[in-house]
């Protein structure tokens, strides 16, 4: 599941630093405007405006979280705006009460009533618009968070789908290799050939190298080369007079990542469709090298050559192409060509990727 990002709640949300800074700035500006016609000291007037602003901010934050489920007929944003409007006169009275150290006795001093009315009027005039601006910013931030969460979730689902598809392709490849290999040694065992024991030993070595790679989403070229060498040793024991092979491996490329059975698919295809059908057999050459942050793999054989229109190459190359697309996107290329005077060549090029661990 993709990670979820939760908003802060409780007092942490109500005292959000950005919200607090905006409230204090607006309160001080409003207090400075109120101090112009007022006979009270500027510090007192600024204090009153700050008390009113902080009170409105706390009420806005309170109704942002409470009640958890507002009535269906009352939108939360409307509740917040109503709370801010009602908090202004209450906050103004509280501000006068605090700055006078008790009852400000409004009836005995009309100037104080005028100051209270002016503070309330300017607060009611300004605070709801600030609250509306905060609500708009909240909606925009919520929309961005939702869009990011959806994008992350979609990316996770796509990754899971690709992994599932890759595993499905690997499941198709696994019996393809195992059954082909078993078929290659069955005839020797049935005929009672003296090489049967040695061939079975080589088969065990091959399976010991192959089986751990079957369920892995990715492997290294070092493991692929080990598997290919075991396979070619096995095939050479089966037809020692008809199969020759050579491996030319760049040591710098051994740590590179690739889909499991990538190299073996090309080699098995060369043996099964190139060397096996040829009366006099042939030779398989495997080359792996690193060049300009690209891995270049070449498997060529001197067997019967490329069939018309590339047919008859089995399921191996088809599944390999799709696994390369799933692993590297469009950044991997598999090219098939004829070799003169006789033979077949598969050239694979993909980006060099190493473990970041």
Image (cartoon, rainbow, N blue to C red):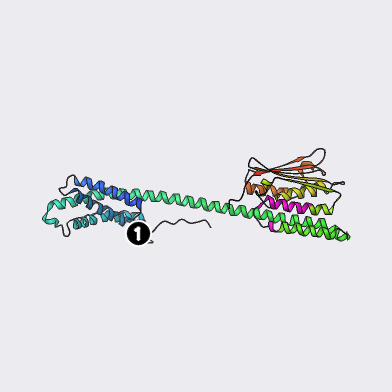
Residue 342, horizontal then vertical, whole percent: 82, 40
Residue 323, horizontal then vertical, whole percent: 66, 49
Observer able to see residue 237 = yes
* Among the 4 quarters of the image, the one containing residue 80: bottom left
Determine whether, in the image, residue 72 is placed left or right of residue 223.
left
**Which residue sits furthest left?**
108
Determine whether, in the image, residue 38 is placed left or right of residue 329.
left
Residue 11, horizontal then vertical, whole percent: 35, 59
Q: Magenta stretch?
A: 212-232
Residue 171, horizontal then vertical, whole percent: 69, 56
Determine whether, in the image, residue 159 is placed left or right of residue 81.
right
Q: What secondary structure is the magenta-colored segment mainly?
A: helix
Q: Does 223 appear in magenta?
A: yes
Determine whether, in the image, residue 117 is placed left or right of residue 249.
left
Observer able to see residue 73 = no
* Among the 4 quarters of the image, the one containing residue 213: bottom right
SS at mark 1 in the image: helix
- Number of other residues with Cα within 10 Å of mark 1, as a class: few under 14, some 14 to 19, many 20 or more: few
């Amino acid at each position: 599941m993709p990670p979820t990002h939760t908003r802060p709640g409780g007092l942490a949300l109500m005292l959000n630093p950005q919200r607090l800074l905006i409230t204090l700035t607006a309160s001080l500006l409003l207090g400075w405007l109120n101090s112009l016609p007022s006979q009270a000291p500027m510090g007192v007037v600024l204090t009153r405006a700050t008390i009113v602003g902080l009170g409105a901010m706390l009420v806005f934050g309170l109704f942002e979280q409470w009640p958890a489920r507002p009535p269906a007929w009352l939108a939360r944003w409307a509740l917040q705006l109503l709370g801010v409007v009602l908090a202004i006169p209450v906050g103004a009275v509280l501000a006068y009460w605090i700055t006078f150290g008790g009852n400000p006795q409004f009836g005995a001093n009309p100037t104080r009533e005028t100051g209270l009315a002016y503070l309330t009027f300017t607060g009611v005039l300004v605070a709801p618009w600030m609250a509306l601006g905060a609500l708009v910013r909240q909606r925009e931030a919520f929309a961005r968070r939702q869009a990011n969460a959806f994008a992350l979730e979609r990316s996770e689902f796509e990754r899971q789908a690709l992994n599932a598809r890759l595993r499905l392709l690997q499941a198709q490849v696994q019996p393809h290799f195992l059954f082909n290999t078993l078929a290659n040694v069955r005839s020797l065992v049935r005929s009672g050939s003296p090489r049967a024991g040695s061939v079975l030993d080589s088969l065990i070595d091959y399976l010991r190298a192959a089986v751990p790679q079957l369920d892995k989403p990715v492997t290294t070229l070092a493991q692929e080369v080990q598997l290919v060498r075991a396979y070619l040793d096995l095939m050479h024991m089966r037809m020692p007079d008809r199969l020759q092979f050579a491996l030319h491996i760049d040591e710098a490329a051994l740590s590179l990542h690739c889909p499991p059975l990538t190299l073996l698919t090309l080699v098995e295809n060369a043996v099964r469709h190139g060397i096996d059908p040829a009366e006099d057999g042939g030779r398989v050459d495997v080359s792996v090298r690193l060049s300009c942050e690209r891995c270049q793999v070449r498997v060529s054989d001197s067997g019967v050559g490329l069939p018309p229109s590339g047919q008859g190459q089995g399921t191996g190359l088809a599944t390999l192409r799709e696994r390369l697309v799933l692993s590297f996107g469009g950044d991997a290329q598999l090219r098939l060509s004829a070799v003169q005077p006789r033979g077949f060549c598969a050239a694979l090029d993909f980006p060099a990727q190493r473990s970041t661990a």
